[in-house]
Image (cartoon, rainbow, N blue to C red):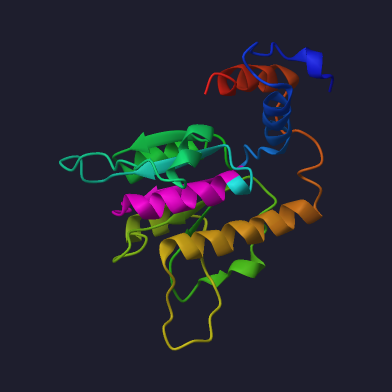
Amino acid sequence: MEENSYNWNQTLTPERAERLHAVLQKRQPDLTVIFEDVNDPHNISAVLRTCDSVGIYEVFIINSYPAKPRRKLGHSSSASAKKWLLTNYFTSVEECFTEVRKRYKKIYSTRLTEQSVSLYDLNLTEPCALVFGNEHRGVSELASSLSDGNFLIPQVGMVQSLNISVACAVTLYEAFRQRLAAGKYEQPAFTQQQLEGLFNEWSGK
């Protein structure tokens, strides 16, 4: 793709423009994360940074308690990743999942059940969404029942749980590993027109 195919913002340095160009080439619009009632904005911020690092394009945040204000992210280095991700907000699990299924083939929840499979048995190269739940309750029964399956991260320690930001990082880097091996980062997933639109949007940030 030629650099002059973009309508570059004149205030951009060539280095900055090239960086935006390179990152957009690797974006994965068929991999996403769903947060269900995650309380701590710092956890969301940390996960958003991981999402950006593996090339995720959009995320979904469910707040099932509309009486509570929308979770606000701070201005930490982790939260700075938010501006490079499309964030979709919902107050209903059903509405969120309905929207997700329009663009993603599978939804997998991190929930321990008798039918849960290992993270490493999932095919994360296909269009999929990964659900992470509340810090205390985990993924709800409703979200679990609406998912295509539940998975767990194999562990051998006494404490059989991980912080949500750690669990998400482990999961997303397994997706990254699989997708890298499958060559999904070698060619842009967006069309030329989409790339141009995103470049123009990003260049103003």
Question: Which quarter of the image is occupied by the N terminus?
Answer: top right
The correct choice, above or below, for 196 with respect to 145 in the image is above
Q: Is residue 116 left or right of residue 138?
A: right
Residue 163 vs 185, above or below: the answer is below
Q: Residue furthest right?
A: 2
Tally of numbered discs:
0
Which residue is at a point 72% across and 28% down the rendered structure image? Answer: 15
Can you give x and y, in whole percent of width and height, for residue 47 in the image?
47, 52
User: Residue 156, how many percent across, how many down?
Assistant: 53, 86
Is residue 84 shown to the viewer in this render? yes
Residue at 68% across / 35% down in the picture? 23
Where is residue 183? Give x, y as percent.
Answer: 81, 48
Q: Is residue 94 left or right of residue 81?
A: left
Q: Write down the quadrant of residue 70 in the picture.
A: top left
Q: Is residue 26 magenta?
A: no
On the image, which quarter does residue 22 sit in? top right
Seen at 43% across and 80% down, the residue is 160
Residue 174 % position (x, y): 65, 61
In the image, residue 54 above or below residue 87: below
Q: Is residue 31 above or below residue 6?
A: below
- 188 vs 109, left or right, is right
Q: Nearer the viewer, residue 131 or 200?
A: 200
Is residue 97 among what the camera can see? Answer: no
Q: Residue 170 vs residue 78: left or right?
A: right
The magenta segment? 31-52
* Residue at the far bottom in the pictured view: 158
The residue under the point 64% across, 19% down is: 12
Q: Nearer the viewer, residue 90 or 26?
A: 26
